[in-house]
Image (cartoon, grey):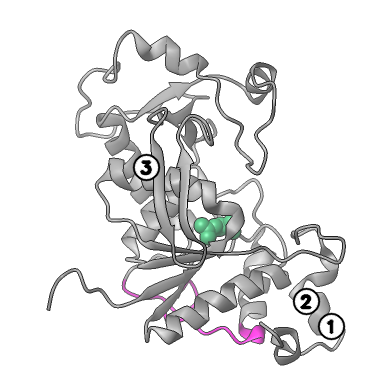
């Protein structure tokens, strides 16, 4: 059998920062349906890396709500599996190894700008995206010294500078194109649609972009199903796959669910949390009608 033909592996990757709502359920349902249609496996990963925002009660609630709704996974924090651990908080060494690899390859640079510095330098906040386009202040400081400004990095993990973000230097002007399995051809231009993004935060936590790539690769996920709000992140993540020499998965982005006023559902929309819906007598079957 060709090594190219891998059996389908999908994932649900909630962050335990609040109760799951109907929008999560719809995207996850699509992920489950696609895994089933391909006769593949579904992994539950607990994206609890951000200790500032995550709460243990939400992890328990998340698993309970997912079971109630009818999700079934074969690998996860509650049932184990060959490619665990499935809690991001237990996978630190994977992220650290990837960070060292990026550093050794000259793909990242230290950045001491505060959010305030960046806000002051960026005139127009970037539309649809949460990470402002970095104006390049610290990149320019490094520029003259070239990519390997830090010298040859030993294979032994070197200490990181305290209170420093590490940013991925994007190839300005390069069009990052990919085929979305749901939305068709997509293209984002590095330096225009997104800038040098944080891969490691000053509080010693890997950023979402890095942790998700490292985990999806290590867990051998073949297709990532998630919300369309992450399309630009996919472009960033493709750069990380390339820099780390990892094969990227396929991507399937789902349109986001909105409320009656057309506002995107978020964890703060308490009324559509699966908990509330369940308490008010709704059944998963009725909620899924028409999906
Ligand atoms: N834990 C992330 C989130 O909930 C996962 C996003 C993704 O699917 O890549 O936003």
Span of residues in magenta: 67-82
Q: Nearer the viewer, mark 1 or mark 3?
A: 3
- Residue 9 image-quadrant placement: bottom left
Name the disc covering residue 239, or none.
3
Looking at the image, which residue is at 81% across and 79% down? 277
Q: Nearer the viewer, residue 15 or 254?
A: 254
- Assign a secondary structure to mark 1: helix
Q: Label 1, label 3: how many angstroms apart (C-alpha)?
A: 43 Å
Q: Earlier in the sequence, mark 1 or mark 3?
A: 3
Q: Tell whether label 2 touches label 1 (CB within 8 Å).
A: yes
Residue placed furthest toward the front: 185
Name the mark on residue 275.
Answer: 2
**In this rendering, would 17 be left or right of 36?**
right
Quarter of the picture holding the N terminus: bottom left
Question: Regarding mark 3 in the picture, which secondary structure is present there?
Answer: helix
Q: In the rendered structure, find residue 279 and report the number of the disc placed on it.
A: 1
Q: Is residue 79 visible?
A: yes
Label 1: few (<14), some (14–19) or many (≥20) C-alpha neighbours in 10 Å: few
Q: Nearer the viewer, mark 2 or mark 3?
A: 3
Q: Position of residue 46 (x, y in %)?
A: 53, 64
Give the x, y percent position of residue 212: 45, 53
Cβ atoms under marks 1 and 3 closer than 8 Å: no
Q: Is residue 86 left or right of residue 3?
A: right
Where is residue 174 shown, x and y percent of the image? 38, 34
Q: Earlier in the sequence, mark 2 or mark 3?
A: 3
Residue placed at 65% from the left, 68% from the top? 24
Q: Is residue 58 above or below residue 39?
A: above
């Amino acid at each position: 059998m060709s090594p190219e033909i891998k059996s389908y592996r999908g994932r649900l990757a909630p962050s335990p920062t609040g109760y799951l709502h109907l929008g999560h359920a719809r995207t996850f349902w699509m992920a489950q349906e696609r895994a089933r249609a391909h006769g593949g496996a579904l992994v539950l990963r607990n994206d609890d890396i951000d200790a500032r925002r995550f709460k243990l009660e939400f992890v328990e609630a998340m698993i309970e709500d997912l079971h109630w709704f009818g999700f079934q996974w074969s690998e996860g924090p509650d049932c184990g599996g060959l490619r665990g651990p499935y809690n991001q908080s237990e996978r630190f060494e994977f992220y650290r190894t990837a960070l060292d690899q990026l550093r050794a390859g000259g793909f990242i640079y230290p950045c001491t700008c505060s959010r305030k510095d960046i806000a002051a330098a960026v005139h127009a906040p970037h539309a649809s995206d949460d990470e402002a386009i970095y104006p390049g202040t610290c990149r320019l400081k490094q520029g003259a010294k070239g990519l390997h400004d830090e010298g040859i990095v030993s294979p032994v993990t070197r200490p990181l500078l305290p209170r420093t973000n590490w940013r991925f230097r994007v190839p300005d002007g390069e069009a990052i194109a990919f085929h979305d399995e749901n939305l068709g051809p997509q293209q984002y231009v590095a330096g225009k649609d997104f800038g040098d993004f944080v891969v490691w935060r000053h509080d010693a936590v890997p950023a979402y972009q890095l942790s998700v790539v490292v985990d999806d690769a290590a867990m051998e996920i073949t297709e990532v199903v998630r919300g369309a709000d992450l399309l630009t992140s996919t472009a960033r993540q493709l750069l990380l796959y390339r820099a780390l020499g990892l094969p990227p998965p396929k991507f399937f982005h789902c349109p986001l669910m909105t409320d009656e006023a057309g506002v995107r559902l978020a964890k703060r929309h308490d009324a559509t949390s699966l908990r509330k819906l369940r308490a008010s007598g709704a059944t998963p079957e009725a909620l899924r009608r028409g999906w």
